[in-house]
Amino acid sequence: MSEARDAEPAKTGRGHRLPRDPKPWARRHGWFLAVLALGAALRALAMLGYRPALWFPDTYTYVVTVFRPRPDLVRPAGYSMFLKLLEPLHAFAAVTVVQHLLGLAAGVLIYRAARRAPRWARTLATAPVLLDAYQIELEHLLVSDTLFMFLVVTAVVLCTTRRSTPATGTVVAIGLLLAAATLTRTVGQPLIVVVAAWFVLRRRFRPAAVLLAAALVPIIAYGAWFHATYQRTGLIGANGVFLYARTMSFADCAKMDPPPDLAVLCDPRPPERRPPSQEYIWAKDSPLVLRPGITFTKENDDLAARFATLAITSQPLDYAASVLTELGRTFTWDRPVYPDPEIYAYYQFPVAPPGPPGRYPAQVGAEYAKLYEQGAIGTEIVEPYAGWLRAYQSLVRLPGPVLLGILLVPPVAAIVRRRRSRRPGTKQAGAPAWAVSWSVAVVLLVTPAAAAEFDYRYVLPAVPLACLAAALSIKSKPRA
């Protein structure tokens, strides 16, 4: 009996379906249930050991937007809307509980979507999102990445429906989920194109058009709100600034020969002696930060975009090498400190309660955080639970080379399968089922390396999708 039939309820002689005995179902999925239970226990430890949550510099921007509803110039307001939904509870602990539940739900969705794979492959595909210590720590941080991951995973899972042509309602849901992901983190924008292209490759042109329409409606509405606020086109006002910072890892003004208005953004130091890219956005001595007005004015952003464009077109090979260097950090075995000790420390379960970040708008945001909580804010570390988690984090994570191996499984499996089944006159199938999750995972890894810089938390949302692609590329053998 195949895996698909194994999961279906029994039928009576009249065609009525009867529920199966829950005990056989539990035995069939016992390994996954054990992994899920362990994941839930680890998240309970996080709630017990670090109360109510862990803070990140971005947190304060999101909290300010909850009480001052307006688009932010650097980050879209999707996560703030999520916080606003939970604000009546007046508890950041409730936010972390929901984020941990989203992490567990992502594991369940991956397991369900990989239903055609062997159960061992399905279970292994869920292990990183359910058991990786850094994933659990990310869910305990008050940042947008867990929500973003869940929205993208849900959208991709809906793409794996067994129907050759998904229902219109399903396609609309996929579009809305990708729009919500984009309004949570702007790296979601290319994912809309990737998923629509997947439908086109499968010759499903109408679903592709419906998906694009469903995704564009909320994005255009948000863009209109942004334009009404700042008289600027876009979802944020920092694209040029971030790309400028990215190019400063290789930009050589001697090669670029910039005009005088762009030359003010040059750094005379050789690239190997420069700080990490993000310092050109936040450091007080950055050429861009030293310009009049705030860093993200339209004039500064346009100037930064022009500088970045000139750097890339003047030094395309240097840019490509820089992108590959940043992307390569994803696949290292160890976990070196990067981009700086302060940011790196936020991804570790701390030994001592961390102080509030010093960057603006921490001062203003802290007051709004107290209003959100309706009480004092801070992180209380409770032993021995916190110590157990720290010990676990020192041992359990997904190493970079293993992630690379997971990404290589689908294309290698496809090549092997094609060589074994090649026959004259055989019609080539459209894009395989694993292609959409694999493509989304790759785009999530490459885009930050190309447009900003590598960051450990940017890797984690791609992991469950890479695992799903690997599982989908391994087909179950029918049992007699």
Image: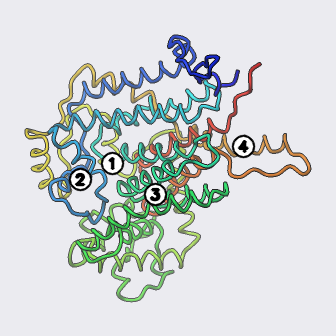
- Residue plotted at (20% across, 76% down): 293
Spot occupied by residue 463 in the image (x, y as percentages of width and height): 50, 41
- Label 2 residue SS: helix
Going from the N terminus, do you reach mark 2 or mark 3 first?
2
Q: Tell me the residue that label 3 is attached to.
A: 448
The quarter in which the C terminus is drawn is top right
Q: In the figure, 188 relative to 146: above or below?
A: below
Q: CA distance from mark 2 to mark 1?
A: 9 Å
Q: Three-letter amino acid code at disc 4?
A: Val
Q: Three-letter amino acid code at disc 3?
A: Pro
- Label 4 residue SS: helix
Residue sticking out furthest to the front: 14
- Label 1 residue SS: loop
Going from the N terminus, do you reach mark 2 or mark 1 first?
2
Q: CA distance from mark 4 to mark 2?
A: 42 Å
Find out whether the residues at labels 1 and 3 contact each other: C-beta distance under 8 Å.
no
Q: Tell me the residue that label 1 is attached to.
A: 144
**Nearer the camera: disc 2 or disc 3:** 2
Find out whether the residues at labels 2 and 1 contact each other: C-beta distance under 8 Å.
yes
Q: Three-letter amino acid code at disc 1?
A: Ser
Q: Tell me the residue that label 4 is attached to.
A: 412
Going from the N terminus, do you reach mark 4 or mark 1 first?
1
Q: Tell me the residue that label 2 is attached to.
A: 62
Chosen colour scheme: rainbow
